[in-house]
Image: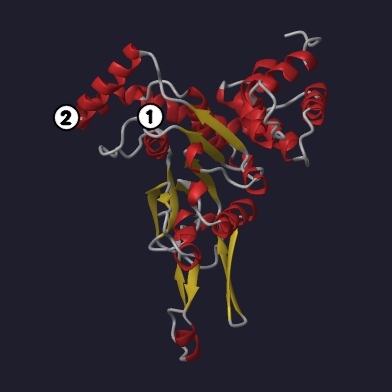
Amino acid sequence: MTFLKNFTNFPFAAIIGQSEMKLALQLNVIDPKIGGVMIMGDRGTGKSTTIRALADLLPEIEIIKNDPFNTDPKSISTEQQYETEKIQIPMVELPLGATEDRVCGTINLKEILSGGSNTFEPGLLARANRGLLYVDEINLLDDHLVDVLLDSAASGWNTVEREGISIKHPAKFILIGSGNPEEGELRPQLLDRFGMHAEIRTIRDPKLRVKIVEERMSFDQSPQLWFEKYEKEQEGIQNQLIRAQQSLSKVQISSDFQFKISQICSELEIEGLRGDIVSTRAAKAMAALENRMEVTLEDIQRTISLCLRHRLRRDPMESVNSGEKIQQTFQRIFSTVKI
């Protein structure tokens, strides 16, 4: 399997550290129904670099040529023949100052009334269909716009209405948001709708920091040589993701494990059932990533904090952070399970 090389983006295989963020992104690629990922962390920790690097790993998709919605030819009637083309899975970045019209698209009433053909101007959601939509500094975005993005990501459709006229088009994408917690948090109601929440911190080890600086400077100097150096690793990760996507439907999880996941959510007083659903999906995607057909205890342990930490009720008097609290509850409930 080959992939398009974008020599302006740092290769995913070369990124040092930040394993939690990389894992969350890969699991969402394997199972987009996990519901996207919110990445919160310090400035300059490689959030945008990692997301763009992941997009370069994804395989090509077939679309109807020049179609603004990246329509899959297999999803429409075969009675009519369409010219098709292959493109790299789209990765759309949402500018911070984007308006709702820019995001959702606009209906051209003048064209409609005059009988013209250009009645709808697609927005960024149309471009992101069947791909990734990345919003940097999402915590600074207007809450209404975040709600629109989350609604489209959950339903897979974007609806634009104006003066009694409604246009609907597919908008299936993986929503990835990032931000710095010092600049504000998303409202809990919006945060809960993200499938996963990854926390990243600045690397403190001086040796690792020096290595990152050296590798980045080396990449900037000769990106083509850098890609050749990591080409086998890049192809290995890509093949691993494709295999996991294909085998995901065959992965099984025991009823006992499912019960214990729900028990953890209940003990942590997680509101609603999103936590239960996403934790189960993430564990199955983890097993698929590791090329296994049965979910293990370790699969749940490695993914459950990503799925639940942003759903916990926050107590300012509590000294234990959310990730530790989840792991402590996990250890207690799963202590009787034999690996």
Q: Position of residue 138 (x, y in %)?
A: 49, 48
Name the image quarter holding residue 143: bottom right
Amino acid type for the residue under numbered disc 1: Phe
Which residue does the numbered mark 1 point to in the structure image?
A: 12
Q: Nearer the viewer, residue 151 or 71?
A: 151
Color theme of the render: secondary structure
How far across and how far down the image is residue 164, in percent?
Answer: 62, 82
| Amino acid identity at mark 2 | Gln
Q: Rounded to the nearest whole Å, what is the CA distance between mark 1 and mark 2?
A: 18 Å
Viewer-closest of 329 and 60: 329
**Residue drawn at point x = 48 percent, y = 23 percent:** 19
Residue in the foreground of this view, choosing between 235 and 142: 142
Classify residue 8 as left or right of residue 174: left
Is 60 rendered above or below residue 337?
below
211 left or right of 169? left
- Which residue position is annotated with label 2? 221
**Could you tell me which secondary element the residue under label 2 belongs to?**
helix
Which label was assigned to residue 114? none
Q: Is residue 294 visible?
A: no
In the rendered image, the vertical position of residue 46 relative to residue 257, given as above or below? below
Q: Pick whichever of labels 1 and 2 is earlier in the sequence.
A: 1
Disc 1 element: helix
